[in-house]
Amino acid sequence: MPKVSIIMPVYNAKKYLREAMNSILAQTFKDWEFIIINEFGSNDGTQQIIEEYAQNDSRIKLIQNTQRLGISASLNVGLEVSQGEFIARMDADDISGKDRLTKQVDFMEKNINIGLCGIKPEIFGEEDWEWNAESDPTQIRSDALFFIPVLHPTAMFRKSMLDQFNLRYNESYYCSEDYDLFTRASRCFDISNIQDKSLFRYRRYSTAATYLHKEKGDLICKDLLVESLALLDLHFEVPEIDLLYLHTGLQGLIGEELKKQFLLLDLLLKKILQANMKKQIYDMDALCYTLYKRWVFAYDVIRYQIYKYEESVDQKIK
């Protein structure tokens, strides 16, 4: 039995696939199996590359879907056939640092309360910014209201805890499936992140699935927000959920309407705090910091939109 099962779904992934697979082969931790699920319809040579690698390393196992399953169902296929004590995720366009598995396994073995461990990544490609990855499980549980707890391809799960709480990917989701699973997981066990950017390089580019399915992903994330708020006995209207959600709140507003909506957002955040005082779902100190971060994010949106407005005015004058 391997210690770690690495699960990677792929679909027409030829462009970066060798980089991703080579980064796994280069791991200092060697006790793993690499389960790659190739989606039905993938026809750019991805299967041939995987078969080439599998011929040279028996730890690489190709599962070829015979019908179109989607990413969530494909990931569940990988979970079901995996034999490892730990489940590590990987994507075909990212790069794992050579000590990734060594450091994650060591962390999980030293912290038996942790059921899911992610990594603060280095962002590269068409974007360059800092991923805010919290380490404190109590803070992560609270932050999951608004923020993704773990960057999906960096995740390492404790398989026994996934089974204990019957946690699997929602197969009706073909995007934001990670946020859904992580949110449910945060209610069952502790989650943490390792603060070492050398362990994972996360590629950002305009044709990635994150961008292609953004609108659908936003709808799913809003549904998850509604579910989380319901645990606090809060049932906001659709416009209020749109305002609370990170990627739609205050977008495209200016002037008096922007001021009005910002004040409303502040009121909604206070209602969340008040509701938690009664229900005690989240640690109060952690929730205060979560709501503060959400407020700061909104303030940054305001600053950016005012900047863009002033820029457009200057251009018209010129």
Image (tube, grey):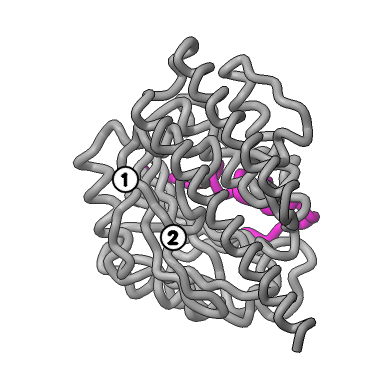
Classify mark 2: residues with Cα within 10 Å, few (<14), some (14-19) or many (20+): some
Q: In this view, does 51 lie above or below 231?
A: below
Q: Disc 2 residue type?
A: Trp
Residue 213, percent from left and from top: 74, 58
Give the CA distance from mark 2 to mark 1: 12 Å
Given residues 194 and 43, the one toward you in this image is 194
Residue 246 visible at all:
yes
Report how many numbered discs are placed on residues in the image.
2
Classify mark 1: residues with Cα within 10 Å, few (<14), some (14-19) or many (20+): some
Given residues 246 and 207, the one toward you in this image is 246
Point out the stretch of residues depicted in magenta: 63-85
Q: Mark 2 points at which residue?
A: 131
- 67 within the magenta span: yes
Residue at figure coordinates x 54%, y 57% from the top left: 300
Residue 55 visible at all:
no
Q: Disc 1 residue type?
A: Ser
Given residues 40 and 247, the one toward you in this image is 247
* Relative to 264, 290 lies left or right: left
Given residues 281 and 120, the one toward you in this image is 281
> In which quadrant is the C terminus drawn?
bottom right
Residue 250, percent from left and from top: 68, 49
Q: Name the residue under label 1.
A: 135
Residue at figure coordinates x 40%, y 64% from the top left: 121
- 5 within the magenta span: no
